[in-house]
Amino acid sequence: MEKVPRPVIRRLAVYLRCLSNLEEKGVQVVSSKQLASMLQIKDSQVRKDLSYFGNLGQRGSGYDVKKLSQKLREVLGLYKTWSVIILGAGNIGKALANHKRLEQNNFKIVAVFDSDKQKIGRQIAPGLKVRNVAELEQFIKENGADIAVLAVPAAVANELACRLEKAGIKGIVCFAPTTLQCKIPVEYVDITVFFKTLAHTIVNSSYNI
Amino acid sequence: MEKVPRPVIRRLAVYLRCLSNLEEKGVQVVSSKQLASMLQIKDSQVRKDLSYFGNLGQRGSGYDVKKLSQKLREVLGLYKTWSVIILGAGNIGKALANHKRLEQNNFKIVAVFDSDKQKIGRQIAPGLKVRNVAELEQFIKENGADIAVLAVPAAVANELACRLEKAGIKGIVCFAPTTLQCKIPVEYVDITVFFKTLAHTIVNSSYNI
């Protein structure tokens, strides 16, 4: 399979969300036009994105919702449950630990760590007590974990990324505003980017400010 | 100016973050190669992205950090302070209300609303008490607001989006997993997309799972 550009992968994840909504409603077939309108993009873009993965639809009759959904799950690596640990029990860590849609999408939060003694031992979400980050390696060794979330200040993110890499974590979702110096895959989340993109759209659209 | 694709705009926001870090360190000139390595992308991509906005660098001598930073701020509409209201005082609303980097980037949270009587009146962040969503229109009329964040369940998101549009809000950042039926610009944030993209990278990289 040829290498799929990251913006395409991001859209696949959104298609999948739309398909799940359709499946829940009992819809069996969807056109590229319908998918496009749900994402507010062009239908030619939808067809181009999905063409990376072979011939998934029939000309004129649209895509089978269930089959397409299955294929996208496979492409995105969602056929297994990913165990996730969160580093940082602040507001972002707490929001993630309680984010039901993560588990619904096969990302299971198995532990939350912090270095703050005020936070260690506290219940942060149903079934999740904050652990001491000193026990990080021990926990991973005993329980295993696939993905780590860095919801910590930028100043300590790199040191923790090194520890995670050494401990065998396979990838990091990083909320800290910094670039990590590690070799495992990292997905950066910068919430301000969404606000900036929106600001750009507002000032460049016909809407007056 | 020709229409700039959204993935480019997203990267501009990330370039800006890198430039701010460099400015703080007193760095005056940056090459496309340095910027590229901070984003883990190709330097040709950086040059292509920035070429949308005229000739910002000199061949061989890189970009002036201050000037480029200023230009990107202008392009992104960050020359003014955007006032932001948050709808939903749950975990996500709370994390955003306390997210210092929003205000540092000229997005000022001016109010938080909820319909839950248990939450109304509570202090959610320094200087921010949760208001009754019934007072939404009144607040916007009296204080003005540019951007609204929907951190509410999908089931009520659309109804609120309509109210926001009527009340004169210019754009929405939507954390609810749904597509809004409004005409103002919307930026959708789906945290699970970052996890899915990472999962894809992990299963498709040489790293074993």
Image: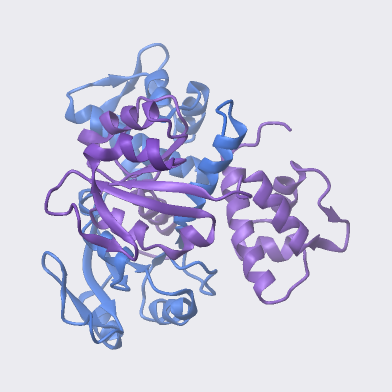
Chain colours: A purple, B blue
The one of B29 and B153 positioned closer to us in this rendering: B153
Residue A147 percent location from the top left of the image: 44, 42
Q: Is residue A60 left or right of residue B169?
A: right
Q: Is residue B167 left or right of residue A75?
A: left
Residue A128 sits in quarter: bottom left
Residue B4 seen anywhere in this rendered image of the structure? no
Residue placed at 29% from the left, 79% from the top? B114
Residue B142 percent location from the top left of the image: 21, 81
The one of A133 and B154 positioned closer to us in this rendering: A133
Is A198 located above or below residue B33 in the figure? below
Residue A116 percent location from the top left of the image: 14, 47
Residue placed at 70% from the left, 46% from the top? A49
Is A110 located above or below residue A161 in the figure? below
Residue placed at 12% from the left, 49% from the top? A117
Residue A105 percent location from the top left of the image: 54, 58
The one of B133 and A176 positioned closer to us in this rendering: A176
Q: Is residue A163 left or right of residue A187?
A: left
Q: Outermost residue toward the front?
A: A142
Residue A18 sits in quarter: bottom right
Residue A79 seen anywhere in this rendered image of the structure? yes
- Give the position of the N terminus of chain A as an image quadrant: top right
Residue placed at 47% from the left, 40% from the top? A146
- Give the position of the C terminus of chain A as an image quadrant: bottom left
Q: Outermost residue toward the top?
A: B60
Is A14 located above or below residue A116 in the figure? below
Q: Is residue A204 left or right of residue B142?
A: right
Is B77 located above or below residue A139 in the figure? below
Q: How many marks?
A: 0
